[in-house]
Image: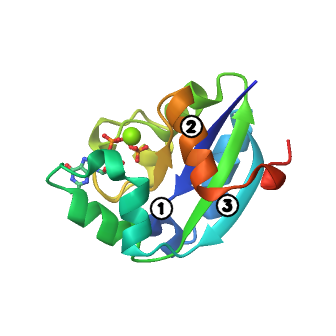
Amino acid sequence: IERTLSIIKPDATKRNLTGKINAKFEDAGLRIIAQKRIQLTKEQAGAFYAVHKERPFFDELTTFMASEPVVVQVLEGESAIAKNREVMGATNPADAAPGTVRAEFAESVGENSVHGSDAPETAAVEIAFFFSSLELVG
Ligand code: GTP
Ligand code: MG
């Protein structure tokens, strides 16, 4: 059984899509074992996305992530990392498969509604960034 860190991004929380996105996760067999709505500062968003620090879109990305509240959550299930990324769809909504979160809800490659960890190592680091072990209730 695997865990992954998911974020419902500002473009989605702003449009009241938290429930619809969570329904897609749950329908895919992912269990939401921790969840909270928080307002990130730009500095906190930069710390979370530190791997992208040198990318040209870093400033746009961190400004966006601090623009409105986000919902951070831990999803648990069989192959949770891959399953979550399947439900999310491709980074660019134009390339996202029909029925995925990004195909249905994302507005652009930047404002693409959700984040999901991409490997077990990053999942562990990203979960610890937002949650203590006491907050994970599997
Ligand atoms: P995450 O689950 O959010 O990590 O998405 P990803 O793994 O599909 O994409 P990646 O890690 O390559 O990029 C991280 C995030 O940076 C994306 O989800 C986008 O929000 C943002 N991003 C990526 N490429 C661009 C871009 O060309 N322009 C802008 N503005 N943002 C981008
Ligand atoms: Mg990524």
**Image: 100 above or below 120:** below
The residue lying at 50 percent from left, 28 percent from top is 119
Is residue 10 in view from this perspective?
Answer: yes
Residue type at mark 1 is Lys
The residue lying at 66 percent from left, 42 percent from top is 25
Q: Which SS class for mark 2?
A: helix
> In front of the other: label 2 or label 3?
2
Q: Which SS class for mark 1?
A: loop
Taking the image as shown, residue 119 lies to the left or right of residue 92, namely right
Q: CA distance from mark 2 to mark 3?
A: 23 Å
Q: Earlier in the sequence, mark 1 or mark 2?
A: 1
CB of mark 3 near ligand 1 (< 8 Å): no
Residue type at mark 3 is Gly
How would you rate the neighbour count of disc 3 (Cα within 10 Å): few for under 14, some for 14-19, many for 20 or more?
few
The residue lying at 41 percent from left, 32 percent from top is 97
How would you rate the neighbour count of disc 2 (Cα within 10 Å): few for under 14, some for 14-19, many for 20 or more?
many
Q: CA distance from mark 3 to mark 1?
A: 13 Å
> In front of the other: label 3 or label 1?
1
Ligand 2 picture quarter: top left
Q: Earlier in the sequence, mark 2 or mark 3?
A: 3
Q: Which residue is mark 3?
A: 19
Is residue 15 in view from this perspective?
Answer: no
User: Which labelled disc corresponds to residue 123?
Assistant: 2
CB of mark 1 near ligand 1 (< 8 Å): yes
Q: Can you give x and y, in whole percent of width and height, for residue 132 in the image?
A: 73, 54
Q: CA distance from mark 1 to mark 2?
A: 17 Å
Taking the image as shown, residue 92 lies to the left or right of residue 87, namely left
Q: Can you give x and y, in whole percent of width and height, for residue 83 in the image?
A: 59, 28
User: Which labelled disc corresponds to residue 9?
Assistant: 1
Front residue of 118/110: it is 118
Q: Can you give x and y, in whole percent of width and height, for residue 43 in the image?
A: 38, 70
